[in-house]
Amino acid sequence: MVNRKELDPDQSPQAAYGVYLRRMRDERGWTQDDLSMRTGYSSAHISAVEIGRRPPTPRFSASTDKAFGTGDKFERQARAVRNTAILEGFPEYVGYEGRAVEIRLYEIGIIPGLLQTPEYARVLADSSVRRGAITPEQADERVSFLAERQSALVRPQPPMMFVIIDESCIRRPVGGTVVMEAQLARLVEFAALPNTLLQIAPYEIGERRTFDLPVNLLTLPDRSVVCYAESQAQGHLDRESISVMPMLTAYHQLQAEALSQTASVAMINQLRKGTP
């Protein structure tokens, strides 16, 4: 088609939404006028969403899901578009995360999102609202978005997950005794799964800790590796092997310094019993 603007779905959640909308329409052989008749939105409005000029609203997405018979897929994608509390680069990372064959995580201070209980995640989100960092609506979307990420990993062939957490993750109280006990129990359950490895990087490794910030490394089906790291205010996704491979090496070095899974689970259980 002449002068048809093509979006890169990895550019942003809004671009991914537009690409998905156009693909679903093309697969059915519908014009924008055809979709307009089925949704009640003008063809100009649909065109603006497809090329990323207009963000999708919840009402538009519900109408589109109904027209295509896609359940709530468009509504879920729209939530990612609206969630401006997500750091730059993270939505693109999540797209890779959902199809990774291996996931390697390192976290400092808080339990990694993929291992958080709903209650633990809610406490963190509500705390951000009280600080004025995000709105209550964004907090709801953040918790919902996390649940979607977790559910995406429940599949017939789940990824192998290697998780190293700094000792501060289990020592830092979040949400009180009940929330923390359930969260620590979740870590023990995670460690017992056949496709997981959980290790704690204890305080005593000192300067031998290879990362000062959280790091996520994904191995994709083609065996390529992508890395995502973030600071307090910015996230960065890296797909260049020349910079990703040293991160993978550093991760392996940290695994060598961290406690074994058996020792890590023992430390968690000691903490659950109130033993230092």
Image (cartoon, helix red, strand yellow):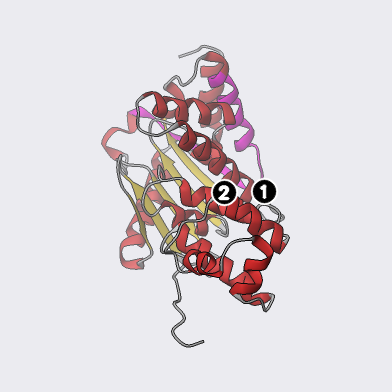
Extreme-top residue of the structure: 274
Quadrant position of the C terminus in the picture: top left
The local crowd at label 1, few if under 14, some if 14 to 19, many if 20 or more residues have their Cα within 10 Å, is: few
Residue 32 falls left or right of residue 71: left
Dot 1 falls on a residue whose secondary structure is loop
Q: Position of residue 86 (x, y in %)?
A: 41, 45
Per the image, the residue denoted by label 1 is: 154
Q: Residue 58 shows which numbered tag? A: 2
> Which is more toward the observer, 214 or 89?
89
Asked if marks 2 and 1 touch (Cβ < 8 Å), the reply is no
* Residue type at the position of mark 1: Val
Q: Residue at x 39, y 53 (%)?
A: 228
Q: Residue at x 41, y 45 (%)?
A: 84
Q: Position of residue 93 (x, y in %)?
A: 45, 55
Q: Position of residue 237 (x, y in %)?
A: 37, 57
Dot 2 falls on a residue whose secondary structure is helix
Q: Position of residue 30 (x, y in %)?
A: 66, 76
Residue 21: which quarter of the image? bottom right
Q: Residue at x 45, y 76 (%)?
A: 6
Magenta region: 179-203
Q: Is residue 251 above or below residue 165?
A: below
* Residue type at the position of mark 2: Pro
